[in-house]
């Protein structure tokens, strides 16, 4: 009740006029984005509309219309009132402490980022038990790391939006989110660091650093010079936030960029754009293959032995997307036999990569523990800034940004 401070669009008399003894059933929300309709049931009051008509049965601003809100219909009858824009949205902030990013989403940091957003009621949890206790009330879940999201219609009947603080949502696609729950991610938050890291990885491969690191571990002096990267070709698989930022940094460095995406949408930093399978014909000209793909049914195993065989022996491979996109056994074999120059892997098929993984011993391979594109200072504030901007959109009924296409899987 206390939350219905005014009924938007229902005339100036509406604020505060729902009777104290009326019941407001917030569980009746039906708007997919805002939950903007309240089901209201209340007793008849003096001067009320004897027919208990729903408020929009009357012209906007008319006494009947505001009275309809005030009275909420006759006893035992329902009507619907637009939810107040000042009703706080119940946001549950759940952080899995195992996540590398857990500290970035500590309660004080989230409150700082929320600023004067009085329209949000924030709750915080770090354990499965605390999350479970909060779910029945939660309308929005801001999630860091993984959590059990099964059976949410029963456990979280009011939930309408899950905002995930990472870009990769592959595990969430199979987590059983109800259809009416919108999923957003943090795609784009990594972009500035991803651009630098992609450039770093290309420069390292070009300078033979993984090869020199392997030689150093073996106590071998292994001098070999080489040219600069300008004029060389990088083939980027995945031209979204990561791939686009990388393309810009690499093009600025003088590389020729060949891009690939599902749509084939042009990008200003890309000399040749391809779509779908079209990247294969450009493999023989690639000095560097950069993978920035999400993991989906289509991309799983997209770079296998056949694709790696089409790369020239001078080529280096970089993966900052998802491990399962790349055939690691094939990559390891090619590096062992010297038919590829080197590789930098930030995303691995199993994370953390176990100590006994044969990948640790593969020559000319550098593994960067999935932290290459993570900026611990900037990531949290940037991600929370985007979330609260989205929350403001949510509360005004505007379209959200960073919405995941759950059918496409990213
Ligand atoms: N290493 C890390 O720490 C780190 C950090 C962030 C993200 N990631 C991973 O990187 C992935 C990409 O992140 P992002 O923010 O760049 O995602 P994004 O903005 O959604 O971009 C995804 C790109 O992949 C393309 N794509 C999707 N399916 C494809 C297919 N079957 N064939 C060709 N292209 C396809 C998309 O094509 P369209 O443009 O046509 O849609 C889009 O260009 C994430 O899903 C996550 O798994 C890793």
Image: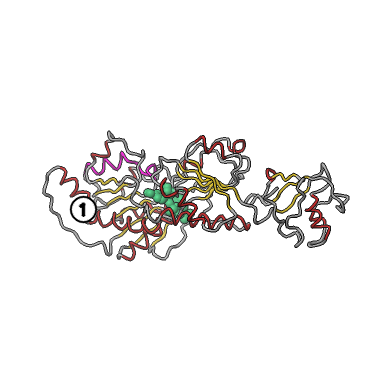
Mark 1 surroundings within 10 Å by alpha-carbon count, few (fewer than 14), some (14 through 19), many (20 or more): many
Q: Nearer the viewer, residue 285 or 383?
A: 383
User: Element under label 1?
Assistant: loop
The answer to whether residue 330 is magenta is yes
Residue 21: x percent and y percent? 77, 45
Instruction: Residue 156: give x, y in percent of width and height.
Output: 60, 39
Question: Which of 196 and 24 lies nearest the eye of the viewer?
Answer: 24
- Is 143 located above or below residue 256 in the figure? above
Q: Is residue 8 left or right of residue 61?
A: left
Horizontal and vertical percent position of residue 8: 71, 58
Residue 406 visible? The answer is no
Q: Nearer the viewer, residue 242 or 16?
A: 16
Q: How is the image coloured?
A: secondary structure
User: What count of labels does the image hold?
Assistant: 1
The main secondary structure of the magenta stretch is: helix
Q: Which region of the structure is painted magenta?
A: 322-337
Q: Residue at x 48, y 57 (%)?
A: 385
Q: Residue at x 65, y 49 (%)?
A: 35
Residue in the picture at 84% in, 57% down: 64
274 and 95: which is toward the camera: 95
Residue 101 as seen in the image, left or right of residue 400: left
Residue 284: x %, y % from top left: 31, 53
Q: Is residue 136 visible?
A: yes
Residue receiving disc 1:
208
Q: Tell me if residue 307 is in the magenta stretch.
A: no
34 vs 128: above or below: below
């Amino acid at each position: 009740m206390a939350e219905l401070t005014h009924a938007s669009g229902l005339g100036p008399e509406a604020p505060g006029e729902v009777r104290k003894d009326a019941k407001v059933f917030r569980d009746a929300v039906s708007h997919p984005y805002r939950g903007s309709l309240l089901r209201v049931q209340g007793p008849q009051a003096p001067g009320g509309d004897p027919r208990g008509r729903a408020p929009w049965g009357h012209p906007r601003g008319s006494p009947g219309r505001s009275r309809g809100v005030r009275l909420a219909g006759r006893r035992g009858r329902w009507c619907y009132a637009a939810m107040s824009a000042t009703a706080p949205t119940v946001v549950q902030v759940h952080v899995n402490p195992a996540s590398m990013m857990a500290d970035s989403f500590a309660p004080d940091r989230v409150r700082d980022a929320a600023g004067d957003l009085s329209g949000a009621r924030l709750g915080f949890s770090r354990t499965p038990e605390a999350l479970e206790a909060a779910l029945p009330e939660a309308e929005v879940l801001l999630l860091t790391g993984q959590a059990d999201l099964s059976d949410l219609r029963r456990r979280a009947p009011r939930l309408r939006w899950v905002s995930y603080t990472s870009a990769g949502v592959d595990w969430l696609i199979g987590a059983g989110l109800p259809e009416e729950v919108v999923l957003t991610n943090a795609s784009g938050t990594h972009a500035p660091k991803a651009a630098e890291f992609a450039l770093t990885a290309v420069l390292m491969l070009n300078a033979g650093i993984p090869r020199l690191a392997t030689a150093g571990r073996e106590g071998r002096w292994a001098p070999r010079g080489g040219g600069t990267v300008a004029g060389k070709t990088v083939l980027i698989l995945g031209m979204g936030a990561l791939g686009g930022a990388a393309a810009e940094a690499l093009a600025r460095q003088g590389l020729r960029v060949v891009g690939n995406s599902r749509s084939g949408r042009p990008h200003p930093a890309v000399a040749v754009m391809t779509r779908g399978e079209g990247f294969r014909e450009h493999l023989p000209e690639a000095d560097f293959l950069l993978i920035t793909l999400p993991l989906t049914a289509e991309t799983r195993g997209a770079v296998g032995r056949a694709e790696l065989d089409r790369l020239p022996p001078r080529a280096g491979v970089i993966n900052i997307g998802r491990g399962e996109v790349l055939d690691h056994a094939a990559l390891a074999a090619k590096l062992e036999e010297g038919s590829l120059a080197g590789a930098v892997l930030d995303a691995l098929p199993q994370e953390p990569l176990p100590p006994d993984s044969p990948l640790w011993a593969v020559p000319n391979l550098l593994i960067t523990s999935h932290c290459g594109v993570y900026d611990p200072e900037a990531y949290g504030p940037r991600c929370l800034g985007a979330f609260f901007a989205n929350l403001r959109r949510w509360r005004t009924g505007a379209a959200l940004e960073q919405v995941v296409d759950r059918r496409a899987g990213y």
